[in-house]
Each structure stands twice: as structure tokens, then as C-alpha cells.
Image (cartoon, helix red, strand yellow):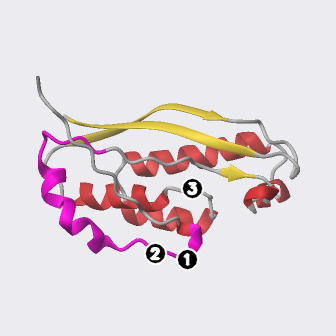
Amino acid sequence: MKTATFTALHSPHPQKGHKNNPHICNPIKKYFQDEGNLFLFSSDFCHYGRRFSFTNILQKYSDTHIFKQNMDRDAANIISRHDIAGFIDYLNKTHNTICGSNPIKMMLQLLQDFSGNVSTKLMHYSQSNQARSTNDSSVSYAGMVSFIN
């Protein structure tokens, strides 16, 4: 029977003033290149509502939950293309409250240097609630999978 070892790496929350540093990936690059290893990068997507300090969508759109879904799908499409510069630009433009944006940027940075052919796909998307007013709260969830072709 094969054994597995799990190692957790914690990436600081982007809202706490921490910036992602591409050099943080250097120590784990060799493990990422080893196809015998599995990496899991975890993040929720948009956190909408007053309690998350993100309500500016309603100022422009009446169907908040639909706009939020489209905004999150834009992020998923950028991630699927492994476009780290595009993802950073997207975050700067939308201010989407993707709490795990730093782990996602780490993954995208590692994929920039990966020698294999990798595909990333959105498998499932959902929202905890269809927010319709600034009093509503909603968290988006996007299940994405990357695999070596």
C-alpha cells in the first residue's frame, strides 16, 4: 500500500495587506514539477454584502446575483488560461473579494514554469444566496480542476 504525506502551506489573506510574492513559489517548484505529487489550491470566490464590505455591484446592476456570477466566471476563465497577469489585472479592476487570490496566484505562477501540458476547467459554480440587496450576503464557490494532458 502506498502512503501519502500531506503538507499544508498557508498563504496570507490578500485583504490583510499581504502581497503575493512570486519568489514564494521557488522552494516548492521541484515538487510541483513531480507528477507524483498532488497540489490543492483552495479559495472561495466573491463575498458579497455589507458584512464583507463589498456591495458596489448593486450601484450599477439590478440583478446582483447574475452580475456576480458573470464576474466570477470571468475570473474562472482567466484562471483556466493560466494568465497570472490577467488575473492580477482582473482583481485590480473588479476588486472581487476572492479570499484565496494569493493561493490562486501561486498556482498560476507555478504553472508558468511547469514543463507539462496542463488544462484547467471550471467543473461547478454556485452561490450561497442570490443577493438582491445590500442587506443580503452571498459567497460564491467555484470548483476547478487542473490536470496534465
Q: Earlier in the sequence, mark 3 or mark 2?
A: 2
Residue at horizontal 50 percent and vertical 67 percent from the top = 89
Residue at mark 2 = 19
Q: Quadrant of the N terminus?
A: top left
Label 1: which secondary element: loop
| Mark whose residue sits in front, 1 or 3 | 1
Give yes or no for residue 52 being in the magenta stretch: no
**Could you say where residue 123 lies in the image, as x and y percent from the top left?**
45, 30
In the visual, does 64 lie left or right of 44? right
Give yes or no for residue 38 being in the magenta stretch: yes
Q: Could you tell me the amino acid type at mark 1? A: Gly
Residue at mark 3 = 98
Residue at mark 1 = 17
**Could you say where residue 106 lies in the image, as x and y percent from the top left?**
34, 60
Residue extending farthest top: 1
Segment colored magenta = 15-39
Residue at horizontal 51 percent and vertical 51 percent from the top = 75
Q: How many marks?
A: 3
In the visual, does 25 lie left or right of 53? left
Q: Could you tell me the amino acid type at mark 3? A: Ile
Q: Is residue 92 visible?
A: no
The foreground one among 25 and 57 is: 25
**Could you say where residue 46 lies in the image, as x and y percent from the top left?**
63, 50
Badge 1: residue crowd in 10 Å (few <14, some 14–19, many ≥20)? few
Measured in 3D between alpha carbons, the distance from the residue under mark 2 to the one under mark 1, in whole angstroms, is: 6 Å
In the visual, does 82 lie left or right of 71? left
Label 3: which secondary element: loop
Residue at horizontal 42 percent and vertical 37 percent from the top = 144
Measured in 3D between alpha carbons, the distance from the residue under mark 3 to the one under mark 2, in whole angstroms, is: 14 Å
